[in-house]
Amino acid sequence: MAILNHLQDNFTAGEWSPLVYGRVRLEKYPNALKTLRDAIATKYGPVIAREGSIYSAEVKTSATATRLIPFIFNTLDAYPIEMGNLYFRFFRNSGQIVAADTDGVVANGGFDTDLASWTDDDQGTGVSAWNAGGYMELDGGGSGNQAQRNQAITIGAGFTAALHVLRFRVQAVGATLNLGTTAGGGEIKADTAYGVGWHSVEFTPGATTFYIEFSSIALNATVDDVSLIDNAAVEIGSPYATADLFEIQLAQSADTIWIVHNNYKPHKLTRSGHSSWSLTEYAPTADPFTTAALYPGTVGFWQQRLWFGRNTTFPRRRYSTMSGDFDDMTTGSDPADALILDPASGEQNRVEWFSPARVLLVGTAGDEDQIRGGSVGEAITPTNENVIPETNIGSDPIQPIRAHNRTLFMNAAGRSLYGLVFSFEVDGYVAVEESELAEHLFPKGTSIVQMAYEKKPYSIIWLVRSDGKLIGLTYERPQEVVAWHLHQTGAAGLFESVCSIPHPDGDRHQTWVIVKRTIDGSAVRYVEYFDDSVYTDSALKYSGSSTSTLSGLDHLEGETVAVRGDGANQTNKTVASGAITLDAAVTEAEVGINFQPKIEILEPEILFKSGTSLGQQKAWHEVFLRVKDTAVQPITVNGDILQGLNPDDIMGTAPAVQTGDIKVNVPSAWSENLALEIIRTLPGPMTILAIHGKIQVND
């Protein structure tokens, strides 16, 4: 009998598929895990418990699926946007954007039967009138002959300095908005044009009476759904129905996102303030998207051009705007003119996505190709363009992720992730299957519905699976880190959408999710975000004077929740009437749904004189966990509490956070398979740097 040392000093290969448990000679086998659930393999080597999530808001309509999209102006100014059935809502600085309280009310903003409450102020030949369709119609007669109507709004003196938000819809033809403290005046906002679409406008009245005025010098301008948002989420309307939300593609430049879907005219979402948003139809010069059969389904930027692809009539066609002008699609022979490309050779598969790189990469249903000028680095022009086939994987329509000079895309079946990267050896692009060693995370009957990239601190690709699981991929290709992990929330919680934006602090990224939960017997959908200050899900935090009761927990009504008070775990509580009573008074607390990170090692491979240790009898002689800043008491190894503590003994006592080697009590029974399963049973910090020890073997 011999006693041999065992060391797993990093976990950068993540969770592996059962299909490769026997491939002990693979270079990454010593760094892999059998199970990595609700925990993250970091690019530095350790495994950490994933962050908990903080509850932000319930979606507008919990009965229907809802999507999150990112709006990123820069690293310090970013917004998650809730895209639901026929509406958008907005979040910023770790919270929902909510309009201030006001006592001002717009009368007859829906124009259901007439224009009552709106004063006629038509100029010259301009005519404003009620339209039987239920809106205000403004028929102007040119300059100096505008059709216009206004309404005086009266508010209390205490609201004059509050930031108000006006919302409205413009149909058919654009209209002009004036906000003033006098009728026809523009003291607050002067003569601002708004296109066809939905709008929210923030302003500070500065007086107890202000005027809302709409006007037009053109015929057939129509205005509808005018209201002031009162102490509620800032929201604008949209044309997008629930069934189409996850098929929408996006491309952003500065303060504008272009939005496309084959069932809708392209739109632009534009920000002009934290509460000022406009969703308008995209109508470029020489617009090629004039009928439903021509509406594009893909969009992207490359070489100062906005690119569109795939419509019902021309599924393989690619369009671009003029160079440097995203609102002009005039074609011609000038180098800056817009382009229309119809690849004639090869399979005629529909375009699924664009990804800008040293060339413009294009994914289609059957292959991947590139668009470029005559050679790499040359500008593409109407007389200097090439479409070159590269790989033949076939792509899913989910927009890809660009990470570490690679384009990460799902294959056409939606069950394998590939990395498209330039290879100097073949002088072209090659596709590497990044999910090959974790194929079990993509089971039959499921597909990936959305992806997001959390760049900092750990470089994680998040993938939402159609069954509500959240897959994570720690991806640091320059260091050969490709580590998969799987996440769930609560017994029945389902992740349905994900997006990642720069954190408000600017030093990392912040990942937001929409989670479908069953609360008090009803299905609800919550907007939440991961945060390293909490260790539970859908959590809320308290900080203040000493208290033994916590309220405001209505979003967890009837749920059994975990409670941390002043750093100590208390016994679980059930939320009743939005409140709980604590075991002991606290000044700081966290309340949320517990989750249990789980780590399970692969069978250690030991080289015997006679060969492999697989199938041979062996036993643990001793095992140590090397940890950092870890509350070890809530952790079990093979079902036993670390250091032999009873779970009841640690309630109410702030656990000691330890760094160093912790000895594990494991049975010394002989077995062909050496198991080591680590579970954090209660909320608390957990970072495992390494697992080491000694193994007894018969050799």
Image (spheres, rainbow, N blue to C red):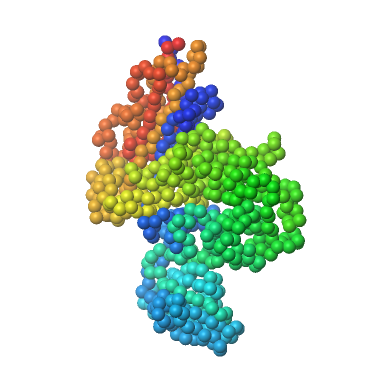
Instruction: Report if residue 566 is visible in the image.
Output: no
Q: Residue at x 45, y 11 (%)?
A: 699
Q: Residue at x 59, y 41 (%)?
A: 393
> Which is more toward the observer, 389 or 303?
389
Q: Does residue 478 appear left or right of residue 232 in this picture?
A: right
Q: Quadrant of the N terminus?
A: top left
Question: On the image, which quarter does residue 689 sit in?
Answer: top left
> Which is more toward the observer, 332 or 228?
332
Q: Residue at x 76, y 61 (%)?
A: 333
Q: Give above or below for 96 relative to 153.
A: above
Question: On the image, which quarter does residue 217 sit in?
Answer: bottom right
Q: Does residue 190 appear left or right of residue 659 in this picture?
A: right
> Which is more toward the observer, 132 or 193?
132
Q: Give above or below for 229 relative to 7.
A: below
Q: Give above or below for 222 relative to 52.
A: below
Find the residue positioned furthest to the bottom: 124
Residue 363 percent location from the top left of the image: 60, 47
Tally the marks: 0
Instruction: Report if residue 494 is visible in the image.
Output: yes
> Which is more toward the observer, 411 or 532?
411
Residue 434 percent location from the top left of the image: 55, 37
Q: Give above or below for 456 relative to 603.
A: below
Residue 404 percent location from the top left of the image: 59, 42
Residue 312 percent location from the top left of the image: 58, 57
Q: Residue at x 63, y 52 (%)?
A: 316
